Image (spheres, helix red, strand yellow):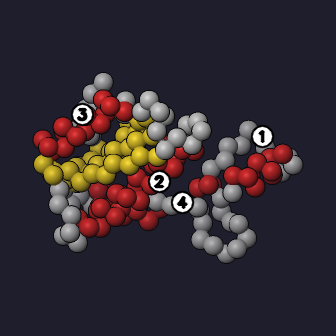
């Protein structure tokens, strides 16, 4: 898709200041469902869970990188005084770009959707917030995490 987009820009079919965003594509002519948004189903499920209350107080996504420019994410849903979380990493793809941040965010949301489904089905346990705080703080410091997305108030990000 990126290659086709770049070619269309070179031909003048798409303005040069237009950024490539797979989520903005509405058709490829094949009849496939669009937009091309990998985490759409997971995000809808997570949003519904958090917005309907069900004890959820926050949904937070943090992203950072290590010295080798490998991206890392930590995403969690706070449910009462317990946490459901996922950690994800993406290897360096030559140079970190905005698209790689989009990629890790999409993968992280998909993984959280799977964890949330397991939790709802009684197959996944939550961990106490005091135990998660240790994981959170270590990951935040190690990868210099920044807030990527939030719904509600999460834990303070240590620096």
| Image quadrant in which the C terminus is located | top left
The crowding category of the residue bearing disc 2, from other C-alpha atoms within 10 Å (few below 14, some 14 to 19, many at least 20), is some
Give the mark, 2 or 4, whose residue is nearer the N terminus.
4
Helix, strand or loop under label 1:
loop
- Left or right: residue 111 versus residue 104 is left
Is any atom of residue 48 visible in this view? no
The crowding category of the residue bearing disc 4, from other C-alpha atoms within 10 Å (few below 14, some 14 to 19, many at least 20), is some
- Residue that mark 1 sits on: 16
Residue 106 is tagged as 2
Furthest residue in direction top, as rendered: 159
The reply to whether callout 4 and callout 3 are in contact (CB within 8 Å) is no
Q: Residue at x 31, y 52 (%)?
A: 86
**Mark-to-mark CA distance, 4 and 3:** 30 Å
Helix, strand or loop under label 4:
loop
Q: Quadrant of residue 44?
A: bottom left
Give the mark, 1 or 4, whose residue is nearer the N terminus.
1
- Nearest to viewer (mark 4 / mark 3): 3
Give the mark, 2 or 1, whose residue is nearer the N terminus.
1
**Mark-to-mark CA distance, 1 and 3:** 41 Å
- Residue that mark 4 sits on: 37
Give the mark, 1 or 3, whose residue is nearer the N terminus.
1
- Left or right: residue 95 versus residue 1 is left
């Amino acid at each position: 898709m990126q290659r086709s987009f770049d070619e269309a820009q070179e031909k003048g079919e798409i303005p040069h200041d237009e950024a490539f965003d797979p989520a903005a594509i509405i058709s490829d002519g094949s009849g496939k469902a669009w937009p091309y948004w990998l985490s759409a189903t997971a995000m809808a499920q997570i949003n519904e869970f958090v917005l309907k209350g069900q004890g959820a107080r926050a949904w937070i996504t943090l992203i950072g990188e290590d010295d080798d420019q490998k991206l890392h994410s930590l995403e969690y849903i706070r449910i009462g005084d317990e946490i459901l979380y996922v950690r994800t990493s993406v290897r360096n793809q030559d140079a970190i770009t905005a698209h790689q941040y989009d990629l890790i965010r999409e993968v992280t949301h998909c993984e959280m959707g799977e964890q949330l489904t397991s939790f709802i089905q009684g197959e996944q346990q939550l961990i106490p917030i005091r135990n998660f705080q240790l994981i959170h703080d270590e990951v935040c410091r190690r990868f210099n995490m920044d807030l990527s997305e939030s719904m509600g108030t999460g834990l303070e990000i240590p620096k």
